[in-house]
Image: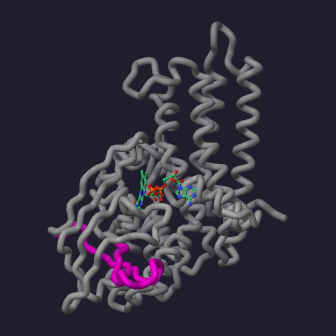
Amino acid sequence: MNFNFTKEEELFVEEVKNFIKEEKKKSNADDVFAPNREADAQTKIDSPARREFMKILSSKGYLGMSWPKEYGGKEKPGIYDYILNEELCRVGAPSPGKGVGSIGQTIIHHGSNRIKDEFLPQILAGEIDFALGYSEPGAGSDLASLKLKAEKKDGGWLINGQKIWTSSAHVADWYWLAARTDPEAPKHKGISVFLVKMDDPGIEVHPIETVGEHATNSVFLTDVFIADEYVIGDVNNGWKYICEALNYERFTFYTIAPLEQKFKELVELINKLSRDGTPLNKIPEIRKKIIYLYADVQKAKVLQRKVLSVAIQDEVPQTEAAVFKLFSTKLHQKLANEAMDILGREGLFRKECQDSHANGKWEWSYRSTLVDTIGAGTTEIQKNTIAKKSLNLPL
Ligand SMILES: Cc1cc2nc3c(=O)[nH]c(=O)nc-3n(C[C@H](O)[C@H](O)[C@H](O)COP(=O)(O)OP(=O)(O)OC[C@H]3O[C@@H](n4cnc5c(N)ncnc54)[C@H](O)[C@@H]3O)c2cc1C
């Protein structure tokens, strides 16, 4: 059993770290890197510098490393995508997971030649951004209940209805959209996936404010016409593509670096600050908290390596991912909560307040990591997966 990277993989970690170090020296670095990853990255989501950064990743050959050569990739093992993603997330840089990891891979496997020719080169060049249109007001955990109506017309489909929680709909170029193409079929059988230009006049995007300042949206679609060539794969087979697209994210979706990074910063704070004249690092209660947190971060890391070890075999790490997501997202919340406790009154101050610690990082982190317990399957759904698949418990 070996939890370490190979020599080549270690060299790649170093290469990416050096690349990031150089990029951080550039004059626009503040608009690219968001050290308070979750919330900061959202406030910078529409910065042109972040889009430009994707093109730099492309010019370095970092996009599509695991794609087949025939589509411009390098056929490297998925672990390289994982390493790149971890290092980018550690510093709050834009991550290529959605376009390259999920949509690109699904297009490679199921897209027509027409779709491949149009989208794959643009994804590899870092030129386009996508929004994921799955959830609806009545379809979240039970996604197969989605109702967005797609009616067959001459040469295409007419779309009417609403999506909700579409992150980056206000900045994306294309909408990866799931709609109901056969209302009579059983719910998993009548769904299709389309690609729609976000600037279609029938699309209205309304921002939703969230507790964590995560920029997300309601999207209303009125008489949006989509030509037949923009259907992914076979009509009514969309459920399969949705599940696959979610699976393809497995090398890039679940990160550990931001958690490690924040823990490191918390230890630095504790080594710097005092309470009533006593250094925080000498207070037994605080020492105990930090040591337990350290053990938890190590546990999360091992759980993530278990996910990777399955994904590397090209299998879907379903229960491993559920255990890791359940544990690590709760831990992220716990870390921020403990930090606020340790820092006392100032730990609760927002970034605008003069006396806030680390620019209000911890209260912000507490609010913004909440979304991690909801997206890509809520905590309860992860528990259901574990109960059913690992423990054979009734649901
Ligand atoms: C900030 C943010 C960004 C998002 N971005 C996107 C995006 O870009 N694209 C997209 O398509 N979606 C996005 N989502 C949607 C996200 O995937 C859904 O919110 C999530 O799947 C939960 O669905 P729901 O909100 O409809 O809640 P529901 O499914 O209605 O769940 C409500 C509550 O009931 C619980 N529950 C539901 N079913 C069960 C069950 N069977 N057993 C036990 N408990 C259950 C849930 O855990 C939850 O606590 C985003 C959400 C948020 C908050």
Visible in this render: residue 102? yes
Relative placement, left or right, of 198 versus 329 is left
Name the foreground residue: 35 vs 170: 170
- At 20% across and 61% down in the image, what residue appears? 204
- At 58% across and 40% down in the image, what residue appears? 333
The image quarter in which residue 182 lies: bottom left
Relative placement, left or right, of 252 versus 203 is right
Could you say where residue 104 lies in the image, as x and y percent from the top left? 44, 76
Q: Is residue 172 above or below residue 187?
A: above
Q: Is residue 239 above or below residue 338?
A: below
Position of the C terminus, as image quadrant, is: bottom right
- View extreme (left): residue: 201
Could you say where residue 198 lies in the image, as x and y percent from the top left? 25, 67
Q: Which residues are magenta?
A: 177-200
Name the foreground residue: 164 vs 384: 384
Visible in this render: residue 55? no
Relative placement, left or right, of 32 versus 300 is left
The image quarter in which residue 254 lies: bottom right
Could you say where residue 6 lies in the image, as x and y percent from the top left? 73, 66
- At 33% across and 84% down in the image, what residue appears? 231
Name the foreground residue: 276 vs 242: 242
- At 51% across and 85% down in the image, what residue appears? 69
Does residue 304 belong to the magenta stretch? no
Position of the N terminus, as image quadrant, is: bottom right
